[in-house]
Amino acid sequence: MQEIARKQEVGTGAVVWILSAGEMSEGGNILGVYMDRELARGALVAEAQKLHDRFTISDARQESDGSIHVEGGCDWIALEPHAVVTARELERP
């Protein structure tokens, strides 16, 4: 999993992992931004436990890019990698 992040860093620059949660029809909120996927583990588990306390978890999956998605009731939690822009992009005509 760290290998996925390292490959992204090499190809696109720095990568951060964003933990977010929300409702299917309402959107969501960012709960945290982490420099490493493993740093988000405790917060992800805590949010999943809160979700489990309210609803039965109906879907939990890991995607090929290492992101994790959890759904229960109409709520969701996501931990996803995002490239960080580290230099100004030039506009092309």
Image (tube, helix red, strand yellow):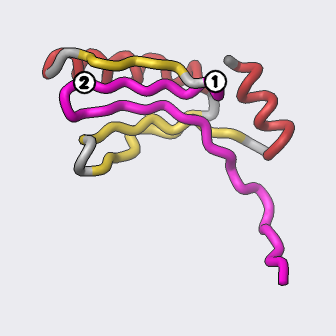
Q: Nearer the viewer, residue 35 or 60?
A: 60
Q: Please tell me how many numbered marks the rendered image carries.
A: 2
Image quadrant where residue 36 sits? top right
The front one of 16 and 75 is 75
Q: Earlier in the sequence, mark 2 or mark 1?
A: 1
| Kind of element beneath mark 1 | loop
Is residue 80 rendered to the left or right of residue 72? right
71 w.r.t. 52: above or below = below
Distance, label 2 to label 1, CA atoms, is: 21 Å
Left or right side of 81 for 90:
right
> What quarter of the picture does the N terminus occupy?
top right
Q: How far from the left and from the top, in percent, is residue 66?
A: 61, 24
- Judge left or right: residue 14 versus residue 58: right
Whether the magenta-drawn stretch holds residue 69 is answered as yes
Residue drawn at 80 percent across, 77 percent down: 91
Segment tinted magenta in the rendering? 64-93
The x, y position of residue 75, in whole percent, is 24, 33
Give the amino acid type for the residue marked by disc 1 in the picture: Ser
The residue labelled by disc 2 is 72
- Examine the image and state in which quarter residue 17 appears: top right
Question: In the image, is 92 to the left or to the right of 50?
Answer: right
| Rendered view: 33 above or below 7 | below
Residue located beneath label 1 in the image: 64
- Residue shown at 22%/21% (left/top)? 50
**Screen quadrant of the C terminus:** bottom right
On the image, which quarter does residue 80 sit in?
top right
Q: Residue at x 64, y 28 (%)?
A: 65
